[in-house]
Image (cartoon, grey):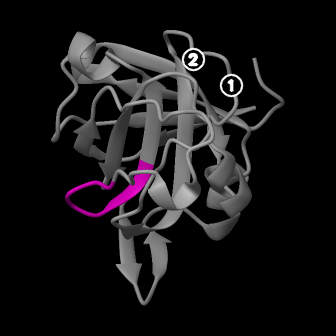
Amino acid sequence: MRKAVNLAALVGIAILGAVAYVGWSATTLGASASASFATVRIPEREYTARVDVARTREERIRGLSGREELLAGTGMLFLFGMLDQHHIWMRDMRFSIDIIWIAGGVVVDTHERLPVPAPGTPLEQLPYFNPRPQALLAIEVPAGTVQQYGIAPGQRVDIVFDEGKGS
């Protein structure tokens, strides 16, 4: 089963560390948030990616660490649960990525071609990458995606969560 979510309609409001989703019940959001995969679209740029969903703290910490590659049209969507200036590091990464930061259903910031750290770099020596404004979501995509598609702040983002086991 697939559930379409227009993030422009899925407005997150941070109040005391909680996010209220206008127009969505906790049950509906919970089902979407538990999905293993999603399809992300930025219609204005004709961009579509099939992404893994990192929804728990452990999944967000692991991220793409240890993977050999990230193919074009794929990525990882990080669900943070509240607006903040979240950070992402490149621990145990073997390839460069771009990050697309999202809040209120639109791109709010991007980072491009993040450098791959030397193998074995201690955690405390890794740089952190944060959005300039607060964000609710982040999408890690192959390096060069942001430039190739002209992805920029202000562009609408749509997400379709897959309720099933993948593609």
Q: Determine if residue 8 is in view.
A: no
Q: Position of residue 126 (x, y in %)?
A: 46, 51
Q: Position of residue 8 (x, y in %)?
A: 32, 48
**Picture quadrant of residue 165:** top right
Three-letter amino acid code at disc 1? Arg
**Is disc 2 placed on a helix, strand or loop?**
loop
Q: Residue at x 34, y 37 (%)?
A: 100
User: Rounded to the nearest whole Å, what is the CA distance between mark 1 and mark 2?
Assistant: 8 Å
The residue under label 2 is: 70
Q: Is residue 39 left or right of residue 129?
A: right
**Is disc 1 placed on a helix, strand or loop?**
loop
Q: Is residue 127 left or right of residue 53?
A: left
Q: Position of residue 21 (x, y in %)?
A: 46, 66
Q: Residue at x 55, y 54 (%)?
A: 79
Residue 119 lies within the magenta run: no
- Locate the C terminus by quadrant: top right
How many marks on residues? 2
Q: Residue at x 73, y 51 (%)?
A: 34
Q: Residue at x 45, y 38 (%)?
A: 139
**Picture quadrant of residue 63:** top right
91 up-or-down from 131: above or below:
above
Closer-to-camera residue (164/137): 137
- Marking on residue 67: 1
The residues colored magenta run: 130-137
Q: Determine if residue 155 is in view.
A: yes
Q: Position of residue 20 (x, y in %)?
A: 46, 74
Q: Residues within 10 Å of mark 2 (few under 14, many from 20)?
A: some
